Image (spheres, rainbow, N blue to C red):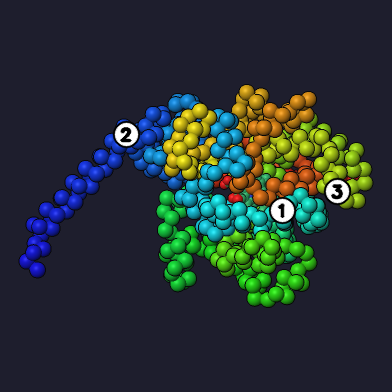
Amino acid sequence: MGFLTPQRLLTGAAYFFTAYIVLRIATIIRLLYFHPLRSFPGPRLAVITRWYRGYFDVILQGEWLRHLQYLHTVYGEVVRIGPNEVHFSMPQAYAEIYASGSPFTKEPVLYKCFGMDEGSFAIVDPHKSKKRREMLLPLFSRRAILKLENIVQEKVHTLITRIVAHGRKPVDMSLAFRCTTFDTISDYCFAQSFNALGAEGFQHPLLINMQTSIKYFWLLRYFPFILPLAYSMPQWLAERSNPLYKEFNVVRLQVEAQVDKFLASEAELENADHETVYHHLIRPKSEKNHETPSRASLFDEALVLLQAGSDTVGHTCIIGTFHALRDNHIHMKLSNELQEAWPNKEARISLSTLERLPYLTAFIKESLRVSHGVITPLARVVPKDTTIAGYPVPAGTIVSTGSTFMHNEPGVFLDPLKFNPERWLAEDTRDLDNHFVPFSRGPRMCIGFNLAWCELYLIFANIFRKLDMEIFETTEKDFDYKEIFVPIRQGRHLRALVAEKAL
Ligand code: HEM
């Protein structure tokens, strides 16, 4: 025992501390002067610690993208933004990183922070991701969307009925749209919805909970142990000691119950009103050698689909409606086109008829362009030494760029911050279409884009054909956002005074 004297302990600690400092200094020198990315310009602090970015993500809560835009004005089109990471601002880099067949893989640290590790969205391994996508795609192909169009038609019909029943009180359109998209995707998954549209004032607790949980994503990116630790504790302890646990668990428990019902009884699947995502996951087609995912993976998939399939579409509806309601020219053009194509509003109009309307189509594209459903640059890992937009990039580097850089490219989208559907009606829009990436591109592009288009056509067509709407106390300032993978709006919700159109 005499061996561990206080004197010796102190000396040991001093050696340890000195060794740590020397090692740290050596790492910093290596990162700055000997690292393969040393020739890329960027802030020195960002090169030596990921906490440079962490400050904008966690402390300023979602300010990184704004800062990134500033960094490009200072350092040019490529910036080293981390010890092992570069960001590109030019379209050519987008085309190469997210090319079809691209071997770049998703960067695990970013995709783990959503707490849905085994769902399609967060799977990193390209082989596993391909298999999962093959299992999901039959429900999201164009053919499947046309077959199940009725689900969307019904939800949109309920949306209109509920809004009209609201009377002359201002309607929270932000929540109303989100309820519609949430009920649609839950019906797609489970052949029954959570009936968010039936909630008083569209305030469905599950939906509100999902929205709140998004705000914690960046915290989980830097402290990834928080959720697994909470899940490993007894529930009462986790609830008391960890406020995040409650936000995430409320949603998880409801989703688990739904998936377990399918797992417990074959009859549940057989008696479903229509084919669902879970028919394909639980009873995979044998000819493709797919296996039923684990129970945990089935839960994660449900969380992914509910989150990815509701927030994004709902948000695009909010942005498009706001712009149409504050610009009379846009509002009139939309209403007139719809009135002409759809004289009897009591009859249903089909998706394929709406797809032929040029102004509505241009309006939806512009809503997708300016709303940036996913705004955080989509980080990928380079598998072997390569060049991106002419810059040599070594294997293992994390690279990214994002839709905001594509959609605000002034050489392509003139006056890019202006909401202008007419830009899509020009004679030749090939250049615009090449830069239009709301659903990303390549092997990990959005699975749900056909469903998203279907919902956007039916929601916009129905509200502008059937409702007279007037903005209520909502201004441009309410649309300031923080970047937490998706844009999180800071101000008041979009509200409108609404009445049913007479004819
Ligand atoms: C306006 C609506 C939508 C937008 C703007 C949008 C955008 C995106 C983007 C940009 C990605 C790529 C993300 C990444 O690489 O990390 C993505 C992936 C994904 N989206 Fe969407 N999305 C929309 C609607 C939907 C819908 C309705 C679903 C319904 C299921 C859905 C399901 C997914 C899934 C599962 C992925 C992950 C795909 C993978 O990683 O392989 N999305 N979405």
The CA distance from mark 1 to mark 2 is 48 Å
Dot 3 falls on a residue whose secondary structure is loop
**What's the mark number on residue 34?**
2
Q: Is mark 3 within 8 Å of ligand 1?
A: no
Residue 407 x/y as whole percent: 63, 33
Q: Which mark is residue 140?
A: 1
- The mark total stands at 3
Q: Nearer the viewer, residue 161 or 304?
A: 304
Name the mark on residue 350: 3
Decide if residue 432 is in sight here.
yes
Residue pushed farthest right?
344
Q: Alpha-carbon distance for marks 3 and 1?
A: 18 Å
Question: Up-down: is 109 above or below 471?
Answer: below
SS type, badge 1: helix
Q: Amino acid at mark 1?
A: Phe
Q: Are marks 1 and 2 in contact (CB under 8 Å)?
A: no
Sequence-first tag of 2 and 3: 2
Cα gap from disc 2 to disc 3, whole angstroms? 61 Å
Q: Quick check: is the Cβ at mark 1 less than 8 Å away from ligand 1?
A: yes
